[in-house]
Amino acid sequence: MTKPRLLIPMSIQFSVRYILRTGLMKRIREVAEPVVLLGWNDVELARELEESGIEVHPLQEVKFSTDYERIRSWINIWYKRRLNTPSEAIWERRADVTRSFSARVRRRLRNRAVRLITGLSGGEAELRRKEGRLLRTETNAPAIWKQIESLKPDAVFSLTPSLLNEEVALRGCVQQRAPICASILSFDNITTRGWMSVTCDRYLVWNRFNRAELLRAYPEIAAQQIHIVGAPQFDFYWDPSYLWTEQAWREQLGLPAERPVILFGGGYFACAPHEPIFLQQLDEAIERKEILQNPIILFRNHPVDPIERWQSVLSRAKHVVYDDPWPKGRITGHANVRNGDIQKLASCLYHSKVHVNVASTMAIDGSIFDRPQVGPAYDDRPGRAYDRTARDLYFQEHYLPITQSGGVDIAYNREELIRAIRSALEDPGRMGAGRKRMVRELCTFDDGCATERVADALETFVSNSVRHGEVATQPV
């Protein structure tokens, strides 16, 4: 019997880690013929897929007019009101930091006008109808949909349905009546991303918080359509084969053998533009012997964060070793993440004595290895421009379970930051119960078997799917 054709957009580098490196693709091939839409030109990755017998096509980039961009921004304003997340006030404060008073007033008036219009009878429906018209006339969506039609998908598996290139392809799949299963890639994607225009037939999420967020933001979704599976990208951490020996790790990264390591995971520049000051302050504290044991800092910047904003600090630092997560295509979000890259990350998390990051998902990664987590939350530069927004980061809706877990030592000034590092080095078991609680709350499972749960859910989804988009209504 011919296997159903399962269309799989791979929009960003994290899709490679999730679908390929976890082994999920091998499980998919047992029940379906994968058809990959690759979001960037990567000859080696395409060859790897094709040599495994996987059909590969380009995921076309969406081109759009100013009018279409404007209507989408209006829809996102409406969507945020329906989402009703406490994060919105935090985002607005952060957006205001770099805006003039007049720009702030204009932004508020525009948002208020859009909310008023969509609050009127029929306003929301008209806004969405207009978006649909402009999508057909002011973008290249019709050409993308022709490609989807030619591929004849029987079903679809999507990780990032909120990204525009992937979303427009999914809308073409809806036209072809191909049922869609969306596995939401990260625990923050529902509240921090914009409106997802496609209502999928199945949703796979990390935890109960994500389930509640989907139901609140998209009342058209039924509870039985959502299945909690955990986070497959963390499965590697439960596999000892992904850990280098400490000696090999230190040699590979150029770390001295005798010094304990503080892992500093840099964040995305838009979240905390002033973040390099924390790296500078830690380096200075080591130089002044404010932190005992003479540690060294291993700095890894965010995969899509420009290294240029860190260069000034790195050029002067005396106790920092820099490691690039994966060089090729890093800034664009398009890279072929390999097993060696994952082994290096897992080894950094495991062998480092304490981890520092600013309200990052990395706190979960590190807590799986039960390493002390420290979160700077201040701006002590003259003017303190980001002081309030730095604290706000820890109270965004998606991050609240981490903050409330008791697993992160949040520092509200330089003295607290240094004290937290000293405490972590002297008593690594402190706050251990909070770290375990964090993993349990955010990942739901702590068994390293999330990939298997996704694979089982996909198998059921595909087997219950037929060409005309009819899906069995029982839970996955």
Image (tube, helix red, strand yellow):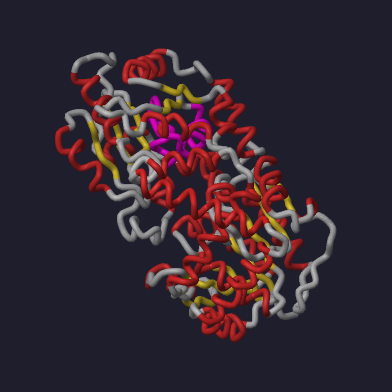
Residue drawn 22% across the image and 14% down it:
289
Q: Is residue 110 above or below residue 137?
A: above
Residue 121 in picture, x, y percent from top left: 72, 61
Q: Is residue 430 above or below residue 315?
A: above
Q: Is residue 329 above or below residue 89?
A: below
Residue drawn 47% across the image and 73% down it:
62
Residue 28 in picture, x, y percent from top left: 64, 64
Residue 424 in picture, x, y percent from top left: 41, 18
Q: Classify residue 369 as left or right of residue 183.
A: left
Residue 142 quadrant: bottom right
Residue 218 quadrant: bottom right
**Name of the residue lying farthest toward the left:** 316
Task: Give the quarter of the figure containing the N terminus.
Answer: bottom right
Residue 176 quadrant: bottom right
Say which of 112 and 329 sits in front. 112
Task: Give the quarter of the figure containing the C terminus.
Answer: bottom right
Residue drawn 49% across the image and 79% down it:
138
Q: How many marks?
A: 0
Say which of 300 and 60 sits in front. 60
Say which of 468 and 396 sits in front. 396
Magenta range is: 344-370
Residue 45 among magenta residues: no
Residue 346 among magenta residues: yes
Residue 434 in picture, x, y percent from top left: 57, 23
Q: Classify residue 27 as left or right of residue 163.
A: right
